[in-house]
Image: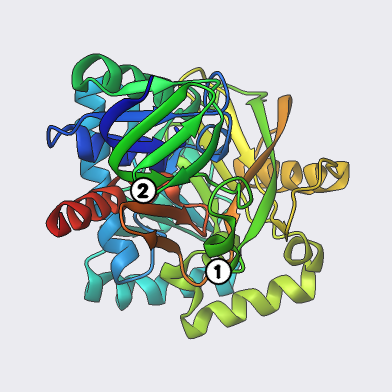
């Protein structure tokens, strides 16, 4: 028996859920299909960092700011735990400090980044001097952290309970065509179908996706406990991240940071390592990450990469940490831009992220996509 909805969404990651929210709050009848019993992809394997500070000026910064407000709404509506203390980007050397200083004096003012550069006594006051061995710290005030493993299920519960979104888990979607979806959960019809399949480029609509020449990024991730009573309440990054994030990476001063990395720590560049540390609500620290790109994600982790990340974490935190869990992160990467919204046929769309910032910009990106579809209806 064929069931009818206004909108069908394939994928219950952050992009799929964000599109479901944007549509359901406008009164549309929505159904979401997920092949596993609970989401297991990029949206639950990440740091839970929704960064505004790292996004480059333009559409990505606009989306991150708008997504921050949506996350705030979800915290109230769905009972999500969100830390809104911001992030600290620590400068480990003169080149990193100079980059942060130039950013604060120029781009941050020009584009309204909500940041503060801490040095001297202000830096020394952080966590009772715990980070005093650094040269400076950029406080990204608008950045926030959430615990993805709990936030995604909580968002699903809210969408189902309060907005009437229908979920089909452990349901493989075999085929989509304009107006029709065929799955192990049955046959469905809808005026609009959106495929939010993450890094799965082959199951559905493989031909238009292949034209983007996307890749998959594999990351090594760790959960650890500090061997002292650190009680970290902020996300932690270093100048290593400044050559990775677009807010800084194209500034001339970033070239000096990159040159020093290549000269002194080429293994970090070769493995795409730039330190991120995100505290969980339970006192643990999510630590990473590395970046390896290809058409498939290798299942094999290198212990040496974990060792380098832990070494960076202990140097930055000024304490030893004990690993309690390891896993692979994975996300779609290296497309024609940071994201794509394909329209291969009337009523059939594909929403893809090509960077690892879906949690940061996905909610607002979905709002934009749904508004566009409804305007054209």
Mark sitting earlier along the chain (2/1): 1
* Mark 2, secondary structure of its residue: helix
Specify how the rendered protein is coloured: rainbow
Q: Residue at x 85, y 42 (%)?
A: 300
Place of residue 283 in the rendered image (x, y in percent of width and height, measured from the top left): 52, 21
Place of residue 206 in the rendered image (x, y in percent of width and height, measured from the top left): 59, 56
* Mark 1, secondary structure of its residue: loop
Place of residue 9 in the rendered image (x, y in percent of width and height, measured from the top left): 38, 38
Q: Which residue is mark 1?
A: 212
Quadrant containing the C terminus is bottom left
Can residue 84 be seen in the rendering of this structure? no
CB under 8 Å between discs 2 and 1: no
Hey, which quadrant is residue 144 in on the image? top left
Drawn side of residue 329 relative to residue 238, left or right: right
Could you say which disc has been placed on residue 362 in the image? 2
Place of residue 293 in the rendered image (x, y in percent of width and height, measured from the top left): 71, 60
Drawn side of residue 63 relative to residue 41, left or right: left
Drawn side of residue 264 relative to residue 8, left or right: right
Closer to viewer: mark 2 or mark 1: 1
Hey, which quadrant is residue 30 in on the image? top left
Residue found at the far front of this picture = 1
Q: Residue at x 73, y 30 (%)?
A: 326
- 58 or 201: nearer the viewer: 201
Local packing at callout 1 (Cα closer than 10 Å; few below 14, some 14-19, many 20+) is: some
Q: CA distance from mark 2 to mark 1?
A: 19 Å
Quadrant containing the N terminus is top left
- 137 or 58: nearer the viewer: 58
Q: Residue at x 50, y 85 (%)?
A: 252
Could you say which disc has been placed on residue 367 in the image? none
């Amino acid at each position: 028996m064929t069931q009818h909805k206004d909108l069908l969404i394939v994928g219950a990651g952050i992009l799929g859920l964000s599109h479901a929210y944007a549509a359901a709050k406008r009164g549309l009848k929505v159904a979401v299909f997920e092949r596993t019993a609970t989401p297991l992809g990029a949206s639950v394997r990440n740091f839970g960092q929704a960064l505004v500070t790292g996004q480059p000026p333009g559409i990505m910064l606009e989306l991150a700011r708008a997504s921050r407000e949506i996350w705030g709404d979800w915290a109230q509506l769905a009972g999500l735990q969100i830390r809104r203390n911001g992030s600290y980007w620590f400068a480990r050397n003169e080149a990193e400090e100079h980059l942060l200083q130039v950013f604060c004096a120029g781009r941050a003012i020009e584009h309204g980044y909500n940041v503060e550069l801490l040095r001297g006594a202000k830096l020394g006051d952080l966590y009772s001097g715990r980070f005093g061995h650094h040269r400076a710290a950029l406080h990204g005030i608008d950045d926030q952290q959430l615990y993805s493993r709990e936030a995604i299920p909580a968002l699903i519960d809210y969408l189902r309970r309060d907005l009437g979104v229908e979920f089909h888990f452990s349901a493989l979607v075999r085929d989509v065509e304009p107006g029709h979806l065929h799955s192990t959960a049955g046959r469905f019809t809808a005026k609009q179908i959106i495929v939010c399949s993450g890094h799965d480029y082959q199951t559905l609509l493989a031909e238009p996706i292949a034209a983007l020449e996307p890749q998959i990024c594999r990351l090594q991730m760790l959960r650890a406990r500090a061997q002292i009573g650190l009680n970290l309440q902020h996300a932690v990054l270093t100048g290593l991240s400044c050559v990775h994030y677009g807010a800084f990476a194209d500034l001339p001063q970033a070239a000096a940071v990159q040159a020093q990395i290549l000269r002194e720590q080429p293994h970090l560049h070769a493995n795409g390592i730039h330190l991120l540390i995100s505290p969980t609500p339970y006192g643990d620290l999510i630590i990473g990450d590395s970046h390896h790109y290809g058409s498939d994600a290798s299942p094999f982790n290198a212990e040496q990469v974990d060792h380098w990340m832990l070494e960076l974490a202990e140097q930055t935190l000024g304490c030893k940490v004990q690993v309690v869990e390891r896993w692979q992160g994975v996300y779609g990467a290296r497309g024609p831009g940071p994201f794509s919204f394909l329209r291969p046929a009337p009523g059939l769309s594909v929403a893809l992220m090509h960077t690892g910032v879906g949690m940061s910009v996905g909610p607002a990106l979905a709002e934009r996509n749904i508004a566009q579809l409804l305007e054209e209806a």
